[in-house]
Amino acid sequence: MMTKDQRYHFLVDNAVDSMSEQLIEDFHLPVPEALNFIYQSSTLKIIQDPRTLLYTESPDYLYLILKYEYQNGKLPETA
């Protein structure tokens, strides 16, 4: 059984993997560019903040937030 910390890291890593695949596919980005955007994004910062509990949301939902940030240069108002 995973500890709470292990589960947190697993879920965040899984979200990054999923979001990078979707960003690459949707915007035809090279892998390094997609990963660079994700790791510098405000989206990842709020996902990594355990107080938000966003890391428990589905990767598809998290990708919608990231996609908005990619297209608009900022987080959506409700994130």
Image: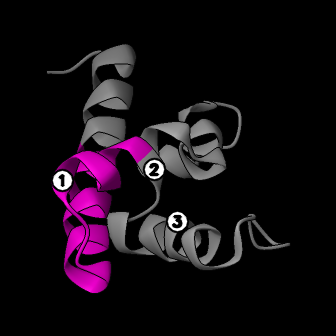
Residue linked to disc 3: 66
Where 72 sits versus 62, above or below? below
> In the depicted view, which residue is nearer to us: 75 or 29?
29
* Residue 78 point in image, percent of width and height: 81, 72
Give the SS element for disc 1: helix
The CA distance from mark 1 to mark 2 is 10 Å
Which disc is residue 15 wearing? none
Residue linked to disc 2: 37
Which class describes the residues within 10 Å of circle 3: few (<14), some (14-19), or many (20+)?
Answer: many
Residue linked to disc 1: 31
Q: Quadrant of residue 47?
A: top right
The CA distance from mark 1 to mark 3 is 16 Å
Is 47 contained in the magenta span? Answer: no
Earlier sequence position, callout 1 versus callout 2 = 1
Predominant SS of the magenta segment: helix
Which class describes the residues within 10 Å of circle 2: few (<14), some (14-19), or many (20+)?
Answer: some
Give the magenta part as a residue range. Answer: 14-36
**Side of 66 relative to 11 (left or right):** right
Earlier sequence position, callout 1 versus callout 3 = 1
Which residue is painted at 27% across and 37% down in the image?
13
Is 22 contained in the magenta span? Answer: yes
Amino acid under label 3?
Answer: Leu
* Residue 74 point in image, percent of width and height: 75, 64
Q: How is the image coloured?
A: one colour
> In the depicted view, which residue is nearer to us: 77 or 35?
35
